[in-house]
Image (spheres, coloured by chain):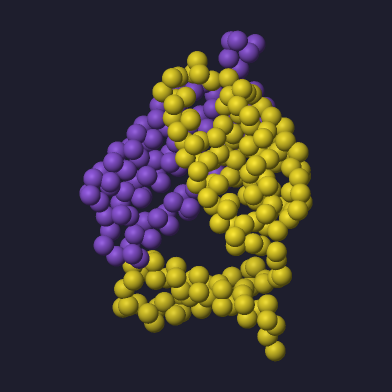
Chain colours: A yellow, B purple
Amino acid sequence: MMSSLMITAILRRGTLLLLLWWILTEGSRDGWVMGIFAVSGALWLSLRLVAPEATRFSLTGMGAFLGFFVCNSVRGGVQVALIALQGRRALQPGTLEVQLLLSSAAPRILMAGVLGLMPGTVSVRLDGRMLLLHVIDERMPIAAEVRALETRIARMFGESL
Amino acid sequence: MIELAATILLCVGGFFYFAGTLGLLRFPDVYSRLHSLAKADNLGLGCILLGLAIQEESLAAALKLVLIWPLALTASAAVSYAIARHADALAIKPWRSREQK
């Protein structure tokens, strides 16, 4: 007897994979037999590698995170482009050590990765809760921005800080 | 109209690639170069993909182009962390400006 957790996982992941197949074949119907094999194979593999479990992952939290991410990665790109045009005299780099409040590993790794695309920061070393950042300009309010990102990641993963 | 928007997006994308490369050449150390490469190129790619996607006639083909963005972002974030991590392990000190010293 399949648990309801398994059934929801099959439905959700199956829909996503079908959508992916549709996108990859650019909506053509010619390869649908191949598609059924590919989607079932991928679904089976995904269930084996990442067993379905009860999570508090929030879809609205993900929406908020994605909005925040897109806005800030645009801001980060524009900012660094302007610094590059001015040359190295516009740089005032430094390092910053941040203690993360996130309690599990996956959101911390996401955080370290995403910070590489946010304005003014690149992750240098993630060691447990300690995250060492390289900042392009020490005068920027980096610590506050790091917290803002952390709050959004925590909400998406259903963690309370 | 769409033609014009696409042209603007492609030019803006090209500009960000240019700025990212400029930073790669001008910035003084590995850490600051990573800022320039990861962030500016990510934005350049996003603009170019969007510019190409709005010209597509089918929705699936447009989505396929847009899907390249998160894949490249994931790779860029992971690679930039790996390079910075290794530079740190080699004890490479971040460059400081003259006023900071």
Q: Horizontal placement of A142 versus A43: left or right?
A: right
- Total marks placed: 0
Task: Evaluate whether residue B25 shows in this view.
Answer: no
Q: Quadrant of residue B12?
A: top left
**Furthest residue toward bottom:** A1
> Is A1 rendered above or below residue B68?
below
> Is A34 rendered above or below residue A62?
below
Give percent across and percent down for residue A99: 76, 38
Give percent across and percent down for residue B17: 38, 36
Relative depth, front residue between B12 and A116? B12
Q: Quadrant of residue A82?
A: top left
Which residue shows up at 63% across the image and 32% down it?
A: A142
> Is A70 rendered above or below residue A56?
above
Give percent across and percent down for residue B95: 59, 20
Relative depth, front residue between B98 and A70? A70
Q: Horizontal placement of B2 versus A125: left or right?
A: left
Picture quarter with the N terminus of chain A: bottom right
Give percent across and percent down for residue A146: 65, 38
Which residue shows up at 62% across the image and 57% down it?
A: A61
Task: Evaluate whether residue B7 shows in this view.
Answer: yes
Which residue shows up at 69% across the image and 29% down it?
A: A96
Q: Horizontal placement of A17 versus A61: left or right?
A: left
Relative depth, front residue between A54 and B95? A54
Q: Horizontal placement of A109 versus A38: left or right?
A: right
Which residue shows up at 66% across the image and 62% down it?
A: A57
Relative depth, front residue between A45 and A55? A55
> Is B27 rendered above or below residue A41?
above
